[in-house]
Image: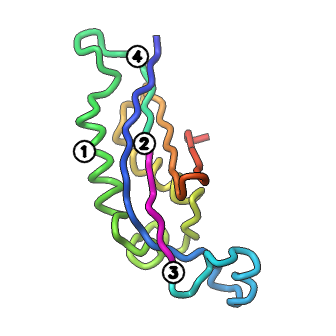
Amino acid sequence: MKITVHRKAHFNAAHRLFRKEWSDERNLEVFGKCSNPNYHGHNYELIVSVTGEPNPETGFVMDLKILKELIYREVEESFDHKNLNLEVPEFKDLNPTAENIVVVIWNKLRNKIREDHDLEVTLYETPRNFVSYKGE
């Protein structure tokens, strides 16, 4: 029997979608207002899902208190109230699209969660725009 547990989290961050080698005009054409040279921000909502068999002694797939602390340490402390382009090393040369952010978060969490548990990360950039990644 496999069960999935979920933990929600939140962080606020600014970013700019652009390619350094492109002109501002080309970036505007491709990324629209998200390429604003002065950056823009989002109130990101994060859902981390861990799937596995419950421990027969505790009944937990994963202790959600531990998952909460892991998300805080690996994601919220690194990303919250930051300019992703300028302050988060993973985005020094990686465009901080929602797609790239969710993969970075997944990679930060994957080696901290038991290997026999599946991990999925869902990231809402807006209430209507969201991405998810399972490591595939």
| Mark 3 or mark 2: whose residue is earlier in sequence | 3
Mark 3: secondary structure:
loop
Q: Amino acid at mark 4?
A: Glu
Q: Which mark is residue 110?
A: 2
Mark toward the viewer: 3 or 1: 3
* Res 8 quadrant in image: top left
Q: Is residue 116 left or right of residue 132?
A: left
Answer whether labels 4 and 1 touch (C-beta < 8 Å): no
User: Which residue corresponds to mark 3?
Assistant: 39
| Mark 3 or mark 4: whose residue is earlier in sequence | 3
Q: Amino acid at mark 2?
A: Arg
Q: Is residue 52 left or right of residue 131?
A: left
65 vs 33: above or below: above
User: Which residue corresponds to mark 1?
Assistant: 69
Residues at marks 2 and 4, CA–CA distance in whole angstroms: 17 Å
* Res 77 quadrant in image: bottom left
Q: Which mark is residue 43?
A: none
Q: Which mark is residue 53?
A: 4
Residues at marks 1 and 2, CA–CA distance in whole angstroms: 14 Å
Q: Is residue 63 left or right of residue 31?
A: left
Q: Amino acid at mark 3?
A: Tyr
| Location of residue 104 in the rendering, given as x and y in whole percent from the top left corner | 48, 56
Q: Predominant secondary structure in magenta?
A: strand
Q: Is residue 35 left or right of residue 63?
A: right
Residue nearer the viewer, 86 or 44? 44
72 vs 33: above or below: above
| Mark 2 or mark 4: whose residue is earlier in sequence | 4
Q: Residues within 10 Å of mark 3 (few under 14, many from 20)?
A: some
